[in-house]
Image: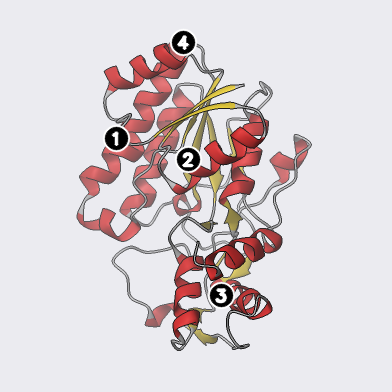
Amino acid sequence: MRVLVTGGGGQLGRALARVGARGGHDVRALPRAGLDVTDAAAVAAALDVHRPAVVINAAAETAVDRAEARPDRAFAVNAIGADRVARACAARAVPLLHVSTDHVFDGLATRPYGEDAAVRPRSVYGRSKAAGEAAVRAAGGVVVRTSWLFSADGCGFVPAIVRAARRGDPLRAVVDHSGSPTAADDLARVLLALGDRRDLPAVLHVAGEPAVTRLALAQAVVDALAAAGAIAPVTVAPASAATWWAPAARPAYAALGGQRLRGLGLAPPPWRCALGRAVQTLARGR
């Protein structure tokens, strides 16, 4: 299957190229320098040149805090760019899988969000992604939401905990934020499995299970480091989200339910084994 990936230089784009190659797919992962999704002519040309069987739109402006100061950039990529990719795909009858986020929700739930839950973003980033979702759905594309993405070659929470633990820094993590950690390679595998199906609902959640707090995820990271012999066993101290100020609001509860995915015969990916592998790679300094 020939797959065109926008945002090919990002964490998920690299995972799609890596996993796709192992699975025998012809993955054309175009980084931002190779395809600006805000340029409608460039998007149309890329589809005409590569002639993919499916497009996976992984292009996104994901700097959540920076988006508060630069909403123009967030909306350009996450909303306008998504719209241009979706329209180009629709014009050529090319299926589109558009990757979105738990940040479209308000975080006030007490059980995993279903696909039909009300979209109520609380940040510029969340609003830009919600606008992109609306554009994709209007053009007939499929929205795939995920949560708390991690990998050994990415950035974010998991690598930050690894670095802090290896430096011997005091470790604290928020106990009152929960979500669904998702390995980038696992998400890539599911996206590629969905790529040649035509029975998909308009919105799907693909996120790791079980849901955990940031504190529990941080403890799992340091436990994996200790098991690999990279650090001595250590306990991560709990902290309240109220003590961690950031420009953008995060959903306090960001777990995503996977019932629709199960209905397609696919399982939400368990994250613990993938986390252990990512931590071991990070501990080796790769």
Indicate which label's residue lies in the foreground, 4 or 1.
1
Residue at the spot of label 2: 13
> In the rendered structure, which amino acid carries the disc numbered 1?
Ala
Residue at the spot of label 1: 33
Closer to the N terminus: mark 3 or mark 2? Answer: 2
Label 3, secondary structure: give it.
Answer: helix
Indicate which label's residue lies in the foreground, 3 or 2.
2
Indicate which label's residue lies in the foreground, 2 or 4.
2
Percent x, y of residue 280: 61, 67
Indicate which label's residue lies in the foreground, 4 or 3.
3
Q: How far apart in space, not on screen, are marks 3 and 2 (Cα)?
A: 25 Å
Q: How far apart in space, not on screen, are marks 4 and 3 (Cα)?
A: 45 Å
**Left or right of 73 in this view: 193:** right
Mark 1 touching mark 2, by CB under 8 A? no
**Left or right of 48 in this view: 198:** right
Closer to the N terminus: mark 1 or mark 2? Answer: 2
Quarter of the N terminus within the rendering: top right
Circle on res. 252: none
Circle on res. 218: 3
> In the rendered structure, which amino acid carries the disc numbered 3?
Ala
